Image: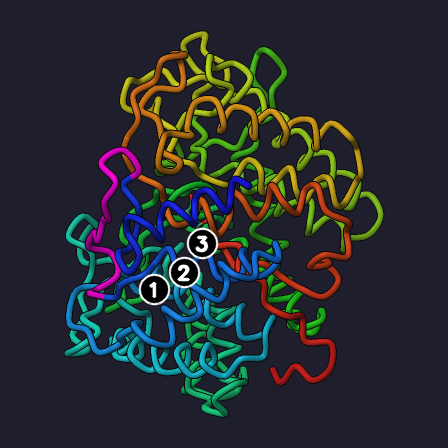
């Protein structure tokens, strides 16, 4: 019902725009997708399909067939176009077998390629989808590329290579033209401070531009794609597994901390100095670490499963300690504060999925009922504080029961938050973790049980 409500209102007031503005009942275009439209349609497709909302799925499909125009000219985020559009189209193709989704994904994939024309092959963050010109984000220090952006292409690009027969996207470790394998090579060569991966890398020199390390924003899905690359290859891509294991070991050693009140958290690192803060984005890590632990052996398996459960519990605390029972954008463990935002600017909640994402993984891997209870708390809080007359909206302050709405129904709410909540209450064989990996926007991609080529 929540998904139908979110979709129906988007369709009524904003179809073809990128997102719905549920208070003003109109559409939002934004500047992340380079003139592409319909981000919510593409992000919602597989969720509608999985939930068996057939009529709504057909509406979305029709929009893709008739109105989704790829001949656009504008500045797009390589990362966002990849995870939302390519991920959404690929997943829907694999679920339905319908060619239109595959051909759109391949066509769009081709348009991203010029971003990789740099001295190292590390792509720049922004690309004009019409001209192919690319550049770095203005806010990224010294023209650098962002770890979570160039490190979150692997899953989709492997499928683009496989479906198109064009090895340029990914294919073999030995293929110098395989774009995402080349990213791996650059990363394996560069020295890692204390084994950690900083967030900013120069696409010109291939060296780090500054030493900020985070498992939240700017770093997050890079780590996620290492373990998921290994899983998607049916455990054959051992290079990815080793990179994940080594990175997690460094994170455990240098970033994992326990608060005075006994809460485990993952701090950020700035040139050796810890910032005792976790972003909402970092809360995906409970699920990721649990997924890795499931496939580890012995002592490591147990230790990582405990770590995953503790982090997920800390993220739950960040929700329960707020008046709305929704969590803030960032919470801190300093100056007497525990799992709460201390800055006004960090008190908002924009319908993000990471906490329910971890509940879903922890439920599937442990079957402890508390994860379903916690998920249900989120459902109730969303209904109470984020549902407005024409859709769902983010809120500006989770610490007041009369929050102001931000007038934005993010597309990832339909792609991720509602999908993970649904899966939390489904049988385990609905998109089984044995057969699917979720890209970082929760779009399911099939595990290659037969012939991985690396
Ligand atoms: C999503 O677009 C993806 O999960 C991404 O990896 C991080 N941020 C948002 C949702 O919060």
- For residue 225, say whether it is visible: no
Specify the label residue 205 is tagged with.
none
Q: Which residue is mark 2?
A: 84
First along the sequence among labels 2 and 3: 2
- Residue 310's image quarter? top right
The boundaries of the magenta stretch are: 22-35
| Label 1 sits on residue | 81
Q: Which callout, 2 or 3, points to the residue nearer the camera?
A: 2
**Spatial CA span between label 1 and label 3:** 29 Å
Label 2 and label 3: CA atoms lie apart by 30 Å
Q: Earlier in the sequence, mark 1 or mark 3?
A: 1
Most foreground residue, 116 or 440: 440
Q: Position of residue 111 (x, y in %)?
A: 29, 79
Of 83 and 414, nearer the camera is 414
Residue for badge 3: 192
Name the element at disc 1. Answer: helix
Element carrying mark 2:
helix
Density class for disc 3 (Cα within 10 Å; few <14, some 14-19, many ≥20) is some
Q: Position of residue 240 (x, y in %)?
A: 59, 65
Q: Quadrant of residue 337?
A: top left
* Label 2 near ligand 1 (CB < 8 Å): yes
Left or right relative to 282: residue 298: right
Query: Residue 369, image x and y in percent?
Result: 78, 30
Q: Which residue: 32% across, 61% down?
A: 38
Give the CA separation, mark 2 to mark 1: 6 Å
Name of the residue lying farthest toward the right:
298
Identify which residue is drawn at 45% across, 7% down.
Answer: 336
Secondary structure at badge 3 equals loop
């Amino acid at each position: 019902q929540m998904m139908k409500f979110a979709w129906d209102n988007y369709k009524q007031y904003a179809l073809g725009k990128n997102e719905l503005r549920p208070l003003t009942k109109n559409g939002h275009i934004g500047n992340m997708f380079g003139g592409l439209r319909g981000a919510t349609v593409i992000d919602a497709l597989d969720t509608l399909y999985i939930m068996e909302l057939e009529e709504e799925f057909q509406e979305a499909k029709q929009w893709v067939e008739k109105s989704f125009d790829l001949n656009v000219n504008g500045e797009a985020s390589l990362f966002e176009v990849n995870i939302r559009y390519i991920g959404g189209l690929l997943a829907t193709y694999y679920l339905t077998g319908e060619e239109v989704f595959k051909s759109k994904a391949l066509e769009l994939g081709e348009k991203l390629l010029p971003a990789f024309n740099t001295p190292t092959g590390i792509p720049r963050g922004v690309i004009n989808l019409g001209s192919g010109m690319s550049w770095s984000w203005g806010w990224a220090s010294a023209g650098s590329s962002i770890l979570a952006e160039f490190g979150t292409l692997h899953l989709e690009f492997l499928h683009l290579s496989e479906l198109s027969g064009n090895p340029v996207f990914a294919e073999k470790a030995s293929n110098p033209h395989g774009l995402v394998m080349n990213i791996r090579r650059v990363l394996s060569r560069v020295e890692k401070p204390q084994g950690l991966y900083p967030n900013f890398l120069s696409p010109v020199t291939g060296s780090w531009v500054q030493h900020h390390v985070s498992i939240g924003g700017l770093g997050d899905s890079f780590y996620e794609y290492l373990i998921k690359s290994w899983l998607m290859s049916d455990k054959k891509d051992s290079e990815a597994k080793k990179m994940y294991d080594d990175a997690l070991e460094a994170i455990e050693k240098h970033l994992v901390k326990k608060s005075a009140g006994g809460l485990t958290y993952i701090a950020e690192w700035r040139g050796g100095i810890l910032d005792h803060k976790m972003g909402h984005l970092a809360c995906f890590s409970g699920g990721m670490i649990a997924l890795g632990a499931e496939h580890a052996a012995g002592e490591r398996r147990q230790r990582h499963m405990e770590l995953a459960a503790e982090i997920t519990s800390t993220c739950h605390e960040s929700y329960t300690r707020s008046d709305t029972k929704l969590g803030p954008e960032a919470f801190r463990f300093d100056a007497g504060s525990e799992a709460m935002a201390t800055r006004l600017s960090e008190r908002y909640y924009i319908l993000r999925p990471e906490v329910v994402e971890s509940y879903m993984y922890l439920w599937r891997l442990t079957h402890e009922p508390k994860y379903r209870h916690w998920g249900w708390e989120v459902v109730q809080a969303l209904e109470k504080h984020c549902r407005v007359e024409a859709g769902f909206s983010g809120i500006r302050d989770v610490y007041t029961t009369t929050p102001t709405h931000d007038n934005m129904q993010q597309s990832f709410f339909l792609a991720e938050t509602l999908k993970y909540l649904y899966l939390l209450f489904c049988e385990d064989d609905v998109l089984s973790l044995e057969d699917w990996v979720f890209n970082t926007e929760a779009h399911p991609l099939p595990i290659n049980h037969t012939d991985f080529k690396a």
